[in-house]
Image (tube, rainbow, N blue to C red):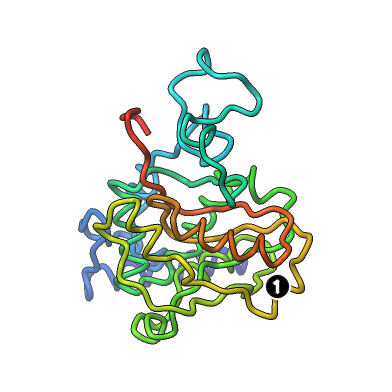
């Protein structure tokens, strides 16, 4: 019997014991986990995630209504065409709803840090356009007080699995109220001057970098971070998040 087969048999036996003794439930659908050693989310829930699919805005990554109404290859949504942004290009796995939202919440608020690896694998798959020729990953930082409260930075956990060198080029210098529930204009005011560049930016000057976070809602946090990086001499700032709040009116986003 080979080593790999022995490991598989051992994990299957452990799964059987854990399923009976602990009866762990999936962090999203709350059904019993048949294979708890593979993580707190069942395979069915992972498969149920609906990724954002082309055509996508070349800027923010929001879906576009149809191929027939856009000019390729640099197609942009109306918002990106009328607004100058510090983030040059952004992508996300899927819309911040359903199973994906539950997985992000389990990672972020329940401390299920083992989810960072498989979630980042989806980010690599669906964010290849922004990761391809980038040199560094820069996680969106938490304020030290929030970092102590949570015990970890979910953005840093995700960045560590993307295959790029992670550089802590930003720090959060001002504690802000949670962005949840704030309208877009207030979100931008809330994070204004909340970030500053660290001495590590000397490593990324003139480079293409990828900002990493769990969720993009209005893009206010990513824009505030990108602004500091551009002012510090970064050539191009892209963004990659696990999920994004898709802008109406296109309901299939």
The residue positioned farthest toward the right in the image shown: 206
**Is disc 1 placed on a helix, strand or loop?**
helix
Number of labels in the image equals 1
Image coordinates for residue 49, horizontal then vertical, percent: 38, 43
Q: Residue at x 70, y 48 (%)?
A: 132
The residue nearer to you, when weighing 137 against 29, is 137
Q: Residue at x 35, y 61 (%)?
A: 35
Q: Quadrant of residue 169?
A: bottom right
Residue located beneath label 1 in the image: 201
- Image quadrant containing the N terminus: bottom right
Q: Is residue 1 visible?
A: no
148 vs 186: above or below: below
Q: Residue at x 58, y 60 (%)?
A: 227
Image coordinates for residue 3, horizontal then vertical, percent: 61, 69
The residue positioned farthest toward the top in the image shown: 68
The crowding category of the residue bearing disc 1, from other C-alpha atoms within 10 Å (few below 14, some 14 to 19, many at least 20), is some
- Image quadrant containing the C terminus: top left
Q: Quadrant of residue 250?
A: top left
Q: Residue at x 59, y 52 (%)?
A: 86
The residue nearer to you, when weighing 54 against 223, is 223
């Amino acid at each position: 019997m080979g080593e790999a087969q022995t490991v598989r048999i051992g994990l299957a036996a452990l799964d059987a014991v854990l399923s009976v003794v602990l009866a762990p439930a999936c962090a999203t659908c709350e059904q019993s986990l048949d294979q708890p050693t593979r993580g707190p989310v069942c395979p069915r829930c992972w498969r149920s995630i609906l990724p954002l699919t082309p055509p996508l805005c070349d800027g923010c990554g929001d879906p576009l209504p149809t191929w027939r109404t856009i000019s390729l290859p640099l197609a942009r949504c109306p918002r990106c065409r009328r607004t100058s942004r510090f983030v040059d290009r952004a992508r996300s796995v899927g819309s911040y709803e359903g199973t994906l939202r539950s997985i992000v919440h389990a990672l972020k608020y329940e401390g299920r840090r083992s989810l960072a690896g498989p979630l980042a694998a989806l980010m690599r798959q669906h964010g290849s356009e922004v990761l391809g020729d980038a040199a560094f990953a820069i996680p969106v930082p938490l304020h030290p007080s929030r970092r102590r409260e949570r015990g970890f930075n979910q953005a840093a956990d995700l960045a560590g699995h993307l295959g790029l060198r992670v550089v802590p080029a930003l720090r959060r210098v001002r504690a802000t109220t949670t962005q949840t529930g704030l309208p877009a204009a207030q979100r931008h005011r809330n994070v204004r001057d909340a970030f500053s560049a660290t001495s590590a930016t000397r490593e990324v000057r003139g480079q293409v970098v990828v900002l990493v976070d769990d969720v993009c809602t209005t893009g206010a946090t990513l824009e505030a971070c990108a602004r500091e990086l551009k002012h510090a001499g970064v050539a191009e700032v892209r963004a990659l998040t696990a999920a994004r709040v898709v802008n109406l009116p296109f309901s299939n986003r």
